[in-house]
Image (cartoon, grey):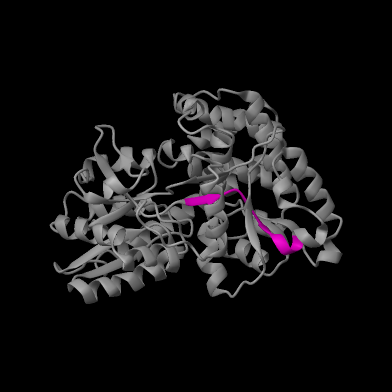
Amino acid sequence: MLKKIIFKLLCMLTVTSTAFVGCGSSEDTAQQAITEVSNKKADSMVENETSDETLRLVNMKVEIDAALKSYAKVYEEQTGIKVEIESIGGGTDMNSVLKGYLAADNMPDIFAFGGAGDYNTWKDQMTDLSTEAWTEDTDVEFIGDDSKVVGFPYAIEGYGITYNKDLLDKAGIDPASLTSYSAYEEAFAKLDGMKEELGIDAVVSMAASIAGGMTWSTGGHNFGSFVSTGVKQGDTSIIDALNAGVVPDRARLDQYAKFVDLLFDYSDEYVLISGSYDDQLALWEDQKAVFIHQGNWIDPNLISDGITFNVGIAPSAFLEEETDGILADAPSWWGIYNGSNKIQQAKDFLTAIATTEEGAKALVLDAGMISPFKSVTISPTAPLAKDLQKWVLAEKIYPWHYTRLPEGFGSNELGPIYELLATGSIDATMFADMVEVAVSELQ
């Protein structure tokens, strides 16, 4: 679908040949990556088979892999039940992997899904969890079309524009002032003029390439800013319109496009166009950039890499009016495969994570997340999670409505448009035009 959208729109607008080359190259690279992943996963199917005594959980957040595996060992010691953690990430399409497993009769007992789009793909394979005790202890369980609980929430995560506070302090910039487009524009220009003094290579570390596997970040999290920034809890008007194939406010989209263009203009060129998740993180951790487009899920990296500078999360404030809040919600959920022969054991494992001290410590202290369960009193110690908790307690948060878009829409349809803007093949106006055309295909 995206090829049709891009070439139709670019032809209509008589874009230079550079844009065509960029688009073709991106699609070829994406197809090659998908083929390689599919082959790799097919080759490993047999290796991933487990014994009848072993639970298997497929996790979509590689940054919490170590914490989950550590807890799995504790759980095995306590119950005798072995839990195999399989973490998939780094730009790999989770749904493609799971579809391969389903086709090979190799589905995990517990699997991650990312929202309404993924739910629509997997709802026929999900177990009803409505009677589980932990459902009374959270407000962010995933509820399906039939009002049944099918998703176990394991965290509250948040994102915006993450910053190095020490570098902002040196530049005399208060992060609390970053609540509008103009504030960011002024701050970026000031920081750019102080590169030598601050010892930075770029103001922003952000990656947008297909080859680098970063379309989940741009077409997902970043587009999520357009969908939800400034939106009150319970207001679904924007996401409802998008799913109906309509951009409800073109002026809002144009302003958002300007903000994306601003981020790209001040980003390290190599990381933006060719970099991976690790490249993006390394530049920021080395204090060669002031901002990074990631959320509190990078906490485990900051801890393991010994990062000591002060950090925080500022709003993705792309509007001219003040938007003093960040996006915080359950990032994804765990469902139980209804074809498993270990459904009760899987339920017991999830209950243990939700209700035991060891489970709380694994999620909050080891994984560096905020617990979605009200009875958990452990406070996060990870630097960005601590800052996120302040936003949550102040009730200055916006929902993750972008997860209600169809499966793959952000990564596969929107992500390549961000890459075109990053490479300079299109401008901000054309970016907004192409996003609007892509959305119209959702009708």
Residue 56, located in which quarter of the rendered image?
bottom left
Chain part drawn in magenta = 157-167
Q: Is residue 164 magenta?
A: yes
Q: Looking at the image, which residue is at 46% across and 28% down?
A: 236
Can residue 316 be seen here? The reply is yes
Residue 66, located in which quarter of the rendered image?
bottom left
Left or right: residue 207 versus residue 78 is right
Question: Considering depth in this image, is 162 or 217 the residue closer to the camera?
Answer: 162
Q: Looking at the image, which residue is at 24% across and 32% down?
A: 146
Query: Which quadrant of the rendered structure holds the C terminus?
Result: top left
| Residue 112, horizontal then vertical, whole percent | 34, 53
Left or right: residue 314 versus residue 105 is right
| Residue 69, horizontal then vertical, whole percent | 34, 71
Q: Looking at the image, which residue is at 43% across and 69% down?
A: 366
Left or right: residue 87 versus residue 192 is left
Q: Looking at the image, which residue is at 83% across and 49% down?
A: 189
Left or right: residue 178 versus residue 217 is right
The overriding secondary structure of the stretch rendered in magenta is strand
Q: How many marks?
A: 0
| Residue 340, horizontal then vertical, whole percent | 16, 55
Above/below status of 71 relative to 338: below
Question: Considering depth in this image, is 403 or 349 the residue closer to the camera?
Answer: 349
Can residue 426 be seen here? The reply is no
